[in-house]
Amino acid sequence: MLYRHPELEVRGGAPEPGLMSLSLEGSPAHLESWLRGVTDFLLTGLRDIEEEHPGSLRIVIRRKGTTDHGT
């Protein structure tokens, strides 16, 4: 959904099994609620995987100008 949105610049990939990255470079203010919904959905799914398979997943969220937030 993020890649297909015409107003967003999204980068990411999965260069090897177990490694995925996703980066959103800026976003229009009018998309804030939509982006929050999309990312909440993604994070909920990843956290479910983390609960089902402890130790197999680490989530790191980086926001420009702040420190890392890992779960």
Image (cartoon, grey):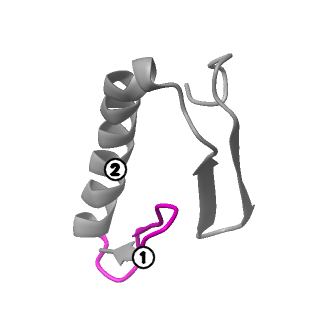
Residues in magenta?
53-68
| Quadrant containing the C terminus in the rendered view | bottom left
Q: Amino acid at mark 1?
A: Asp
Front position among marks 2 and 1? 1
Q: Position of residue 7 (x, y in %)?
A: 64, 20
Which residue is at the far right?
Answer: 15
In the rendered image, is residue 57 in sight? no
Q: Amino acid at mark 2?
A: Leu
The secondary structure type at the circle numbered 2 is helix
Up-down relation of residue 4 to residue 69 (above or below): above
Residue drawn at x 62%, y 19% as measured from the top left: 5
68 left or right of 17 in image? left
In which quarter of the view is residue 20 placed? bottom right
Q: Residues within 10 Å of mark 2 (few under 14, many from 20)?
A: few
Check disc 2 and report the residue beneath it: 43
Task: Determine if the magenta segment contains residue 55.
Answer: yes
| Quadrant containing the N terminus in the rendered view | top right
Q: Position of residue 41 (x, y in %)?
A: 32, 37
Q: Position of residue 24 (x, y in %)?
A: 59, 44
Up-down relation of residue 28 to residue 49 (above or below): above
Numbered mark located on residue 68 in the image: 1
Numbered mark located on residue 11 in the image: none
In which quarter of the view is residue 19 placed? bottom right
Total numbered circles:
2
40 left or right of 63 in image? left
Q: CA distance from mark 2 to mark 1?
A: 16 Å
